[in-house]
Image (cartoon, coloured by chain):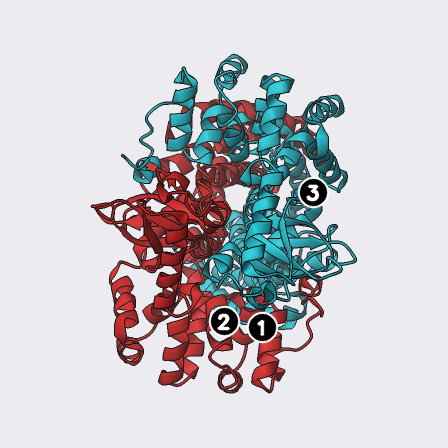
Chain colours: A red, B cyan
Amino acid sequence: MKGPGLDAGVLGVLPVRADRLDSPEAVDEWLRSVGSVERSRQVGTMSREKLAGFVSLLDGATGPELLGSVDPDLATRIVGSADTAQSARWLETVGTDEAAEILRRLTNSGRDKLLDQIGGPQAEVLREVLRWPPTSVAAHMLPDVFTVPDSITAAEAEELVRTQSAQVRGRARHGALIYVTDADRRLIGFLEFQDLVLAQPDQSVAELSSDDPVWVRPLIDAEQAAQSLLDYELAALPVVDDQRRLLGVLTADAAADILEAEATRDAERQGGSEPLEVPYLRASPLRLWRKRIVWLLVLFVAEAYTGTVLRAFEDEMEAVVALAFFIPLLIGTGGNTGTQITTTLVRAMGTGQVRLRDLPRILAKELSTGFLVALTMAAAAIVRAWTLGVGPQITVTVALTVAAIVMWSALVSSVLPLLLKKCRVDPAVVSAPMIATIVDGTGLIIYFLIAHATLPQLAGL
Amino acid sequence: MKGPGLDAGVLGVLPVRADRLDSPEAVDEWLRSVGSVERSRQVGTMSREKLAGFVSLLDGATGPELLGSVDPDLATRIVGSADTAQSARWLETVGTDEAAEILRRLTNSGRDKLLDQIGGPQAEVLREVLRWPPTSVAAHMLPDVFTVPDSITAAEAEELVRTQSAQVRGRARHGALIYVTDADRRLIGFLEFQDLVLAQPDQSVAELSSDDPVWVRPLIDAEQAAQSLLDYELAALPVVDDQRRLLGVLTADAAADILEAEATRDAERQGGSEPLEVPYLRASPLRLWRKRIVWLLVLFVAEAYTGTVLRAFEDEMEAVVALAFFIPLLIGTGGNTGTQITTTLVRAMGTGQVRLRDLPRILAKELSTGFLVALTMAAAAIVRAWTLGVGPQITVTVALTVAAIVMWSALVSSVLPLLLKKCRVDPAVVSAPMIATIVDGTGLIIYFLIAHATLPQLAGL
């Protein structure tokens, strides 16, 4: 017997590609040998025809397995390629949260047709989940959970859990924990299966149960809830109504999916473009253009004032053309300094390490650091100006300007992310291009003001 | 009975701050009400004296609980503030992987003193883990796991697991799964506790066990292993020797810690600075300076050639000073276009969506997108140049240059991350500042070459 060899997966030596599979058994073998990312990659890049052929090989076991592991957009395409009866059977077996993610992406009529086909209590549960706003934690929760009253013994609890498991098809639709309720069916604790196995049969559930479970209300933001699950190191986060009765749980898997999708969106915003929403290799040039062009134009318009600034100092540049040599270097250094600061701050805010009330400490820290950086960069600027042979006066101007721009950039980039947070704007939008745009024009004004003060040639202008 | 109200935690309304706590009971209450990030925040910003006072309130339950939840650097400071006997007791109760993370950060003598104090088989296990290279998965694994042979029944397995649990103190030191071995003690499958609970007592372990577990070798990179655990949606990833005998498991918690630390390092590199390695609020200005200045100087030196380029075109700028007006706008647009592309690509490579062999598809996609972007930006440039009143000839020069720089930047930024990957350099180092630096100077050369071709005033130069 051979393990599927994760080493092989990690090193990218994959036996068969999804588009060459020719039997349900080969699909099963393929699913055992590749992880979810590689599955999404291989299936996601198939043409419509290839996909239809591939989907026809899926059966009642491999269909749900694949749907549960690939990204929801691709899962929706797979469901769209299968006939209604078949996809309904798959959606019955896949987790409720994953089924809801797929159904939410379909047209109203497609969704209703599938839900009618699924029918019964399970369609009811799915309709219930679909009623919650998509950004709420309730929209991502698993409604089926094991619950036991605190008044019974471990042996009785095992029996009860076995009964509850038999009531719904497929283990995938249950959470990893067993929740404990009081006589009023309110959530008061939880058990791990491990606790039941390790307990003496006659121990009471009340004794085994962990008290004071952390819980959230259904309408709380899904990303916040997912972050909290990670933060509290929970296996699952219960969602309760205002009577503290259990509505469902956010599983660790669902939380990881939510956070991963958000991390990708944040990374794209940081790069100064709108989130792509689809895997990169499936994004058409037109979509890429649409997602990027808005920010490029906004930044272009914002940056355009540098032209106005430079035209205002046209006479100065005509008098001392060497001043123009340093424009890219000076504004580049200002942008780099600022980007370093905002990246660190945005990350620290994202992980909760830094809050609004830390602003004074951040400013003190960044301005002290900025001072050290300004001294170093001024020294570097002296060397550079000297080697360009522009004379001592311009050298002094450039060195002073570098120092001033570094300090100015440190100030702007420390305050801006926190200010945006205060205005309830996601600080992740403070991208390197945005900082560069702000610092570029203001940096040029600083440059020419310092030049005026230090260069006698400009005295009359 | 009141739940600890995660809503309160999420909204930041916290009852008591760690530095105001005055009894072991208050510490216990505080631990129940704040998550790991807030714990690290509050304890991490204490002065040495405050910390010593706080640590003296920790007991055999709250000490390990705190050590297991805060970041390893802070946990090491806490261990340093307690006396050896006390910290040894805490490290016995905390998970092996977390204890190893802390011990690895101590001086050799401090580590040996603690290990001697812990003593017994547990010190042996820790010494074993500490022998693995820190970046290997083995250095992060939990060595204690439940194992059962495949030849026994579910009831016998329950009994065996109960015995194994009694052999080591504290549940924290066991994985979440039960591993199944053959007669040669090789790993052949695994069980969830849930499977044991839901099984009939006389069912055989072989029948209940999931086959073909995914596994890794001990020396594989910890980050790769953590990514695979996420990718394969595993509760834990077994680490096996070359006989496929179980050495330990990488738990989902440990994997999440590894990936979170790496995500922070990546974010910092993307912002063009070295990873901080300590929480932001605890980093001194001198440390921040040291982490940032190297990249700033490298970028400064790299960017300095823009001065050489501009000096080479000094005559052109003296003849048509209006050319200088557009320098920041043109190089800014080139940088922005490139940053958008590299951010998307680096992220897609990080999550495994894009590989080296996709280069032709990426180039086709990015150059088509670049063409659309170039047309749009050229139109915007015409409007801008017109409003600055620089005349039709310079307007044409600027519009052509914008289009050319956009295409050039698209080419550079699509190839660079994949090229670095090929050279085994982490593509996350391709930061916005690096792209800007590459595109700035080359963009200026393009600018003045186009100006030469289109402006009759420059014909003689």
- Residue A41 position within the rendered picture, expressed as x and y whole percent measured from the top left: 56, 70
A48 or A401: nearer the viewer: A48
Q: Is residue A389 visible?
A: no
Query: In the displayed structure, would residue B347 be above or below residue B142?
Result: below
Asked if badges 2 and 3 are on one and the same chain, I answer no
- Residue A94 position within the rendered picture, expressed as x and y whole percent measured from the top left: 42, 69
Asked if badges 2 and 1 are on one and the same chain, I answer yes
- Residue A263 position within the rendered picture, expressed as x and y whole percent measured from the top left: 48, 52
Residue type beneath disc 1: Leu
Asked if badges 3 and 1 are on one and the same chain, I answer no
Per the rendering, the mark at residue A126 is none
Q: How many marks?
A: 3
Q: Are marks 3 and 1 in contact (CB under 8 Å)?
A: no
- Residue A408 position within the rendered picture, expressed as x and y whole percent measured from the top left: 48, 30
Per the rendering, the mark at residue A65 is 2
Query: In the displayed structure, would residue A87 be above or below residue B235?
Result: below
Near mark 3 (Cα within 10 A), the count class, few <14, some 14-19 or many ≥20, is many
Q: Secondary structure at mark 2?
A: helix
Per the rendering, the mark at residue B139 is 3
Distance CA(mark 2)–CA(mark 3): 32 Å
Question: Dot 1 corresponds to which residue?
Answer: A31
